[in-house]
Image (cartoon, helix red, strand yellow):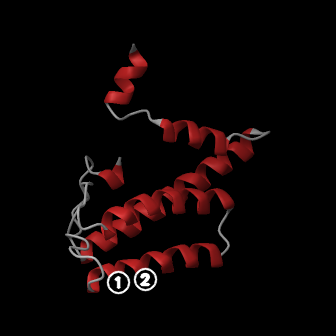
Amino acid sequence: PWVDQLVRDKVYSSGCVIFLVYTLYKTVGDTVYNAVSSLKGAFMASFYIWLLFAIFPDGAQEEFDFIWWFGFVAGAGFIFCLLWLNWDINTAVFAISTFVGYWMVFLSPEQSGSFSKRLDIRYDHQETS
């Protein structure tokens, strides 16, 4: 059916259901606020990993080399600052949950994701989909 086609085209995924559950609330205003907060968190995570891949286009090539430690400290700093600055809970949840998956790809020598490199923005890559 048409839902299977949406999944194949990567328009719909389980992330859509999670987004819906976290954003729905009692009033339209609260729902819109939660949706904007969630999108803000996802955007922050995508922007940050885009910057990391701009600095180190290939990510970490070996475990525990300089780039791995840089990525580890930068990622831990991103999460710490996000929580310390006391962002809205939806912003924090979506920023961290989005970033952690991208972060694992950056730190993995056997990378399995396609990300924009060297400040190039490609809309068919993982951080923009």
User: Would residue 76 appear left or right of 83 to someone viewing this image?
Assistant: left
User: In the image, which disc is placed on residue 73?
Assistant: 2
Amino acid of disc 2: Val
Residue 44 versus residue 71 in the image, above or below: above
Q: Position of residue 26 (x, y in %)?
A: 79, 39
Q: Is residue 66 above or below residue 127?
A: below
Q: Secondary structure at mark 1?
A: helix
Q: Residue furthest bottom?
A: 66
Residue depicted at x 45% and y 35%: 13
Percent x, y of residue 61: 20, 73
Question: Is 49 or 68 nearer to us in this picture?
Answer: 68
The answer to whether residue 98 is left or right of residue 70 is right
- The reply to whether the C-beta atoms of the residues labelled 1 and 2 are less than 8 Å apart is yes
Most extreme residue toward the front is 63
Q: Is residue 5 left or right of residue 38?
A: left
Q: In the picture shown, does residue 95 fall above or below 38? A: below
Other residues around mark 1 within 10 Å, as few (<14) / some (14–19) / many (≥20): some
Q: Is residue 105 above or below residue 21?
A: below
Quadrant the N terminus occupies: top left
- Name the residue that disc number 1 marks: 70
Residue density around tag 2, few if under 14, some if 14–19, many if 20 or more, within 10 Å? few
Tag 2 secondary structure: helix
Q: Mark 1: which amino acid?
A: Phe
Please provide percent x and percent y for residue 118.
Answer: 20, 70
> Quarter-wise, where is residue 64 in the image?
bottom left
**Residue at coordinates 29% horizontally, 66% vertically from top-left?**
108
Q: Is residue 16 left or right of residue 84?
A: left
